[in-house]
Image (cartoon, helix red, strand yellow):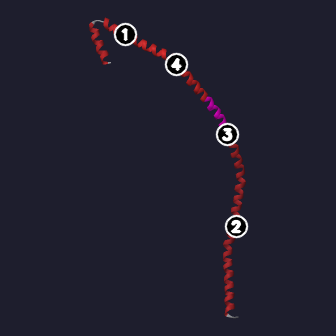
Amino acid sequence: MSVGQIAAIIAAVAFVILVLLLAVPLIKLGRTLDEATIAIRKAHEGSAPLLDDAQVTLTTVNTQLERVDGVTASAQAVAANTRALSSLFTATLGGPLVKAAALSYGLRKASQARRLKNAPPSKRSTRSKRSARA
């Protein structure tokens, strides 16, 4: 055996050892990929009922939103009717009520002035001081 043949045998043995050392991590990586594939498959199988339930929930929510839309439209109509009624009340009774209040205020002031004018002088001075303070 020549030196070249011995070197070739050593190189072949080293190559076999290298292949064996690299085969272990590759086998572990293959197992990990198999486990990941199984986990993804289970997650996919579990997500189908979840997505079906989500679809049912969305349908129910849409139904409820349509009902709320109807209630909102009714509330808006009630608000518009109330606004119109308030406007009508103000136009019909607001002016006369203000005039009646002004008339009663004027009559009260005139009555007070007349009482002060007809009162004895001692009462006039005390009342005029009180009204001056107010």
Q: Is residue 87 left or right of residue 65?
A: left
Please provide percent x and percent y for residue 59: 69, 41
Q: How far apart are marks 1 and 4 (CA)?
A: 29 Å
Secondary structure of the residue carrying numbered label 2 = helix
Q: Which of marks 4 and 2 is in front?
A: 4
3 or 2: tag closer to the N-terminus: 2
4 or 2: tag closer to the N-terminus: 2
Q: Distance between the residues labelled 4 and 2?
A: 86 Å
Please tell me whether residue 132 is drawn above or below residue 32 in the rendered image: above
**Magenta stretch?**
60-75
Q: Do the residues labelled 1 and 4 touch (CB within 8 Å)?
A: no
Circle number at residue 62: 3
Q: Distance between the residues labelled 2 and 1?
A: 107 Å
**Residue pointed to by mark 2:** 31
Report if residue 72 lies within the magenta region. yes
Q: What residue type is labelled 3?
A: Asn
Q: Distance between the residues labelled 3 and 1?
A: 68 Å
1 or 4: tag closer to the N-terminus: 4
Q: Is the magenta stretch mostly helix, strand or loop?
A: helix
**Residue pointed to by mark 1:** 110
**Residue pointed to by mark 4:** 91
Q: Which of marks 3 and 1 is in front?
A: 1
Q: Is residue 9 left or right of residue 132?
A: right
Q: Are marks 3 and 4 in contact (CB under 8 Å)?
A: no
Please provide percent x and percent y for residue 86: 54, 22
Secondary structure of the residue carrying numbered label 1 = helix
**Which of the 4 quarters of the picture holds residue 1?**
bottom right
2 or 1: tag closer to the N-terminus: 2
Q: Are marks 4 and 2 in contact (CB under 8 Å)?
A: no
